[in-house]
Image (cartoon, helix red, strand yellow):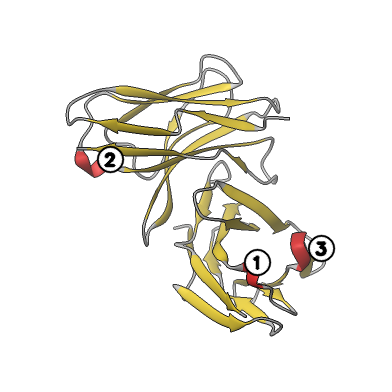
Amino acid sequence: NAGVTQTPKFRVLKTGQSMTLLCAQDMNHEYMYWYRQDPGMGLRLIHYSVGEGTTAKGEVPDGYNVSRLKKQNFLLGLESAAPSQTSVYFCASSSGRITEAFFGQGTRLTVV
Amino acid sequence: AQSVAQPEDQVNVAEGNPLTVKCTYSVSGNPYLFWYVQYPNRGLQFLLKYITGDNLVKGSYGFEAEFNKSQTSFHLKKPSALVSDSALYFCAVRDGGDNFNKFYFGSGTKLNVKP
């Protein structure tokens, strides 16, 4: 009963490096989301997807790209990491318009 | 524009006393409202939601929330706080109108329950 799984849990990057965060859900949910959490700012939506093959921008999309090639996976990419992208990243999924979202355990990313 | 406000960064309450964590929202359509709890170094856990119907919603761990349409509020409550309730609480809204695909989260309220 895994729910939403994020990989990796921790990562340290150097400025300019690239990486991909993987989110996998086993609940057959249509909607998937990537958020970042920063102190005092709550959760801010980076990108989201309403189904396989679709993606859309959220509140803070700059510097990030996403892909949803398979329904169960939602990938978040950083092409050239910057210190401002140091944050905790959460993936979430939901089944429909009025249903709650289920969250992964988070990825703590530090860019030095 | 859609938004959620949690006016208190921190709420302190003694164990056994009632607690309230405040939330107000702004959406263009009908609001779908949610409360989540986050323990240190963990993801967010769903507590309860309001979609339609009775304004008082009951959820996990003895929490409840009251929807007030005229005041656009959805405050989280618990009759008797436990030390184990100490955590970070987030209110979220989903807009039943044009932006229904997105959840909007508040900035979070840290609840401290003292023995």
Which residue lies under the disc numbered 2? A85
Which residue lies under the disc numbered 3? B53
Mark pair 1, 2: CA separation: 32 Å
Q: Amino acid at mark 3?
A: Gly
Q: Residue at x 21, y 26 (%)?
A: A80
- Where residue A92 sits, quadrant-wise, is top right
Mark pair 1, 3: CA separation: 30 Å
Where is B52 relative to A89, above or below? below
Q: Secondary structure at mark 2?
A: helix
Q: Residue at x 57, y 30 (%)?
A: A5
Q: Chain of mark 1?
A: B
Kindly indicate whether the residue at mark 2 contacts the one at mark 1 (C-beta within 8 angstroms). no
Q: Chain of mark 3?
A: B
Q: Callout 3: few (<14), some (14-19), or many (20+) C-alpha neighbours within 10 Å?
A: few
Q: Nearer the viewer, mark 1 or mark 3?
A: 1
Q: Amino acid at mark 1?
A: Ser
The reply to whether label 1 and label 2 mark residues of one chain is no
- Where residue B59 sits, quadrant-wise, is bottom right
Q: Nearer the viewer, mark 2 or mark 3?
A: 2
Question: Relative to residue B34, is residue B1 drawn left or right?
Answer: left
Q: Callout 2: few (<14), some (14-19), or many (20+) C-alpha neighbours within 10 Å?
A: some
Location of residue A65 in the rendering, given as x and y in whole percent from the top left corner? 35, 26
Which residue lies under the disc numbered 1? B84
Q: Compare residues B55 and A66 and report the one nearer the observer.
A: A66
- Where residue B51 sits, quadrant-wise, is bottom right
Location of residue A47 in the rendering, given as x and y in whole percent from the top left corner? 43, 35
Q: Callout 1: few (<14), some (14-19), or many (20+) C-alpha neighbours within 10 Å?
A: few
- Between discs 1 and 3, the one toward the N terminus: 3
Mark pair 2, 3: CA separation: 41 Å
Q: Residue furthest top?
A: A69
